[in-house]
Image: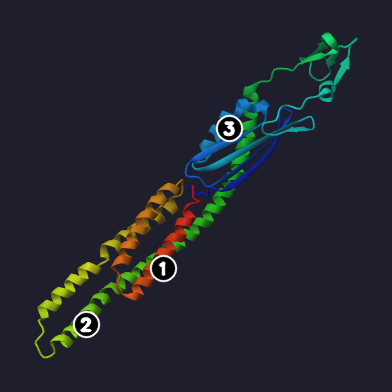
Amino acid sequence: MTLIKSMTGYGRAVKTLLGREFTVELRAVNNRYLDCTVKLPRSLTFAEEGVKQRVKAAVARGKVDVLIFCGRGGRRTGPGQPEPSGVGGIFAGHERHGPGVWRSQRHQRSRVGPASGGFFWLEKPKEDEDELLSALLQVVDEALAAFNAMRAAEGAAMEADLQSRGQTILNLVAQVEAGSPQTVADYRARLEAKMQEVLERTAIDESRILQEAAMFADKVAVDEETVRLRSHLSQMQAMLSGGGAIGRKLDFLLQEMNREANTIGSKCTDLALARVVVEIKAELEKIREQAQNIE
């Protein structure tokens, strides 16, 4: 079963491949859509699109920042930084062959030779970008696994909370449904008492009282709204159980539930029922706040 996930999360992976130590960190916060930013050393800029595609395949929504570090020879390069350079770095591992001529001991393909004015030049070996990308993506996958595990754990906690709140709202809706007929009966009793007081000895037209009570009952009836609200709650519970990227669907469903709750509130003339509707709205607001963090 696919679990729901939170949009916030953190994942990190470190692995040494091809003589380099790759470090990948992923951080994400809430966002309406997927917004992925990759920051990596200049020597790995060719891998940016590949990393983005790998993240998009695993994440549906949220603002995701990917930070990539690369270390080699005891030196670490961070996002936006060039490869370490300098005389010490260039001459390390090279031996001198004649005046101003140096040859690499470690990289047979590197060539260091004399140049005019006492300067030297260094030709670095060309690296296989596909091989580097494949190695980097292995580390990205490990970081994504940790990242998604954290998001799934938080999502499971949110699912339990939302399911509980959904059941609370169903119980409150049951109270509204049970109290609605009593509201009409109370209105009819008040109407009869008022007419008795006004007309005193005059006979009361029972049919008129029934007509007024029927009109009032139609005005305050909440059957349609409670049926729709129950249906929306059932859909929400099914969506939570089914898992997946349900955040935007849940946003829409909550708008519909709030609309039904507002309509019920406008029809409630009984103080006790009005308080129950306020509780329903409060629970819906708490669900809405939680839903803002669901992928």
Circles 1 and 3: CB atoms closer than 8 Å? no
The residue at the point 23 percent across, 78 percent down is 187
Callout 2 crowding tier (Cα within 10 Å): few <14, some 14–19, many ≥20: some
Mark 1 or mark 2, earlier in chain: 2
Q: Amino acid at mark 1?
A: Glu
In terms of secondary structure, where does tag 3 sit?
helix
Q: Which residue is mark 3?
A: 51
Mark 3 vs mark 2, foreground winner is 2
Circles 1 and 2: CB atoms closer than 8 Å? no
**Front-lying residue, 182 or 203:** 203
Residue 269 shown left or right of residue 107 in the figure: left
Residue 163 picture location, percent across and down:
45, 60
The Cα–Cα distance between marks 1 and 3, rounded to whole angstroms, is 46 Å
The residue at the point 51 percent across, 56 percent down is 158
Residue 15 picture location, percent across and down:
70, 36
**The quadrant where residue 77 appears:** top right
In terms of secondary structure, where does tag 2 sit?
helix
Q: Which residue is mark 2?
A: 189
**The quadrant where residue 209 appears:** bottom left
Residue 41 shown left or right of residue 182 in the figure: right
Q: Amino acid at mark 2?
A: Ala
Callout 1 crowding tier (Cα within 10 Å): few <14, some 14–19, many ≥20: some
Mark 1 or mark 3, earlier in chain: 3
Residue 279: which numbered mark, if any? 1
Above or below, comparing residue 181 to residue 106 in the picture: below
Residue 18 picture location, percent across and down:
71, 27
Q: Residue furthest front?
A: 198
Residue 103 picture location, percent across and down:
84, 14
**Front-lying residue, 236 or 90:** 90
Look at the image and tell me whether residue 174 can be seen: yes
